[in-house]
């Protein structure tokens, strides 16, 4: 008999192989391996805990079909994951992130280069991506680093997604924003940084979220922009912020002084990537509509009230 105490990875992997790949049931595995059925159950649990097995839920199961189909038709999307709203906004946001995380291994393919943005939403996604190796995947950081230790940074999001997908991770070794434009120019000219920025053009896919152009955005809270920056861009017609860059209601990039001090991908580069936008909350309606209208995403994960508002808005436009 095989003992259940401290089993080796080899025996756990063999049980997992028989169950998940060969299709044997627990009783058949118990007979074949000379162990009890409870031991088989224990080994299958250990296979997940030791990351020998990655369990992934197909993203299509998160769709609310009618809303998703109409959203795709209206905005020219390839797919939409529409999540029913929970009793509170925080729980809804987490469910949207969970759906995006489960979809991500289907979104990327072998040989892809995935660009990763930053912020609380992308961080929640990164922590929920299933352990699902994607051979030949490269994951790149889209914007530079932020000093605040409390912020889910672009490099932490990039690193975690790469770790869970067994991908090659490439961080951008520069600050996201400099104090002066001439300093940003000099840093962008440094060979190692210049090469990293240039290679962002290899990203054929991207995952990102967005913020409204308001003072309470994380972009202000974590010093990527000041309230004066927000006021200046809002005066130009900005309604949303994507990867630290500002867009108007049509999704057109708005260039200002802050752009001269930023290091990372710009909106023209993002538009060339196949984007996965993860967003929730009606406070982001204008910014989401602008991002979809501007063609920054081909896939979206969002909550049902936001999807309904986007469709109502489109119908009355």
Image (cartoon, grey):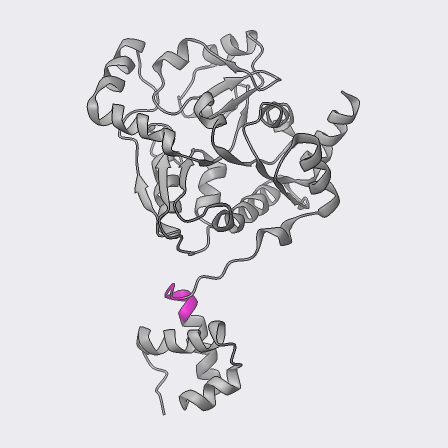
- Camera-side residue: 72 or 99? 72
- The number of numbered badges drawn on the structure is 0
Q: Residue 138 or 131: which is nearer the viewer?
A: 138
Q: Residue at x 40, y 46 (%)?
A: 161
Q: Nearer the viewer, residue 37 or 71?
A: 71
Q: In the rendered view, would you say 233 is above or below 240? A: above
Magenta highlight on residue 49: yes
- Where residue 77 appears, as percent x and y from the top left, is 62, 35
Q: Which residues are magenta?
A: 47-52
Quadrant into which the C terminus falls? top right
Q: Residue 313's x, y, as percent?
A: 74, 25
Identity of the residue drawn at 30% across and 76% down: 8
Q: Residue at x 40, y 71 (%)?
A: 46
At 51% from the left edge and 80% from the top edge, which residue is drawn? Answer: 24
In the rendered view of the protein, which quadrant contains the N terminus?
bottom left
Q: Position of residue 192 (x, y in %)?
A: 21, 27
Residue positioned most to the front:
111
Q: Is residue 237 visible?
A: yes
Decide whether residue 224 is among the magenta residues: no
């Amino acid at each position: 008999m095989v003992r259940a105490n401290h089993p080796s990875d080899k025996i756990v992997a063999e049980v997992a192989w028989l169950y998940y790949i060969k299709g044997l049931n627990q009783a058949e595995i118990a007979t074949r391996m000379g162990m009890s059925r409870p031991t088989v159950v224990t080994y299958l649990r250990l296979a997940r805990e030791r990351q020998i097995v990655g369990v992934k839920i197909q993203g299509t199961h998160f769709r609310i079909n009618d809303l998703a189909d109409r959203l795709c038709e209206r905005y020219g999307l390839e797919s939409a994951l529409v999540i029913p709203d929970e009793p509170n906004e925080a729980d809804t946001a987490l469910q949207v992130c969970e759906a995006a995380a489960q979809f991500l291994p289907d979104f990327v393919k072998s040989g892809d280069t995935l660009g990763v943005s930053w912020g609380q939403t992308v961080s929640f996604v990164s922590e929920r991506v299933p352990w699902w190796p994607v051979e030949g995947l490269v994951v790149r950081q889209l914007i530079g680093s932020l000093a605040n230790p409390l912020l889910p940074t672009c490099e932490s999001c990039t690193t975690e997604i790469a770790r869970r997908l067994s991908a090659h991770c490439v961080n951008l070794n520069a600050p996201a924003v400099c104090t002066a434009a001439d300093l940003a120019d000099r840093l962008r000219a440094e060979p190692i940084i210049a090469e990293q920025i240039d290679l962002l053009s290899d990203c054929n896919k991207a995952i990102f979220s967005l913020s409204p152009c308001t003072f309470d955005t994380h972009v202000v809270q974590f010093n990527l922009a000041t309230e004066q920056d927000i006021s200046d861009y809002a005066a130009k017609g900005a309604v949303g912020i994507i990867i630290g860059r500002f867009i108007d209601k049509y999704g057109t990039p708005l260039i200002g002084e802050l752009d001269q001090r930023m290091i990372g991908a710009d909106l023209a580069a993002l538009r060339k990537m196949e984007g996965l936008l993860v967003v929730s909350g009606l406070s982001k309606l204008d910014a989401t509509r602008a991002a979809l209208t501007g063609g920054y995403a081909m896939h979206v994960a969002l909550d049902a009230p936001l999807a309904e508002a986007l469709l109502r808005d489109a119908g009355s436009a």
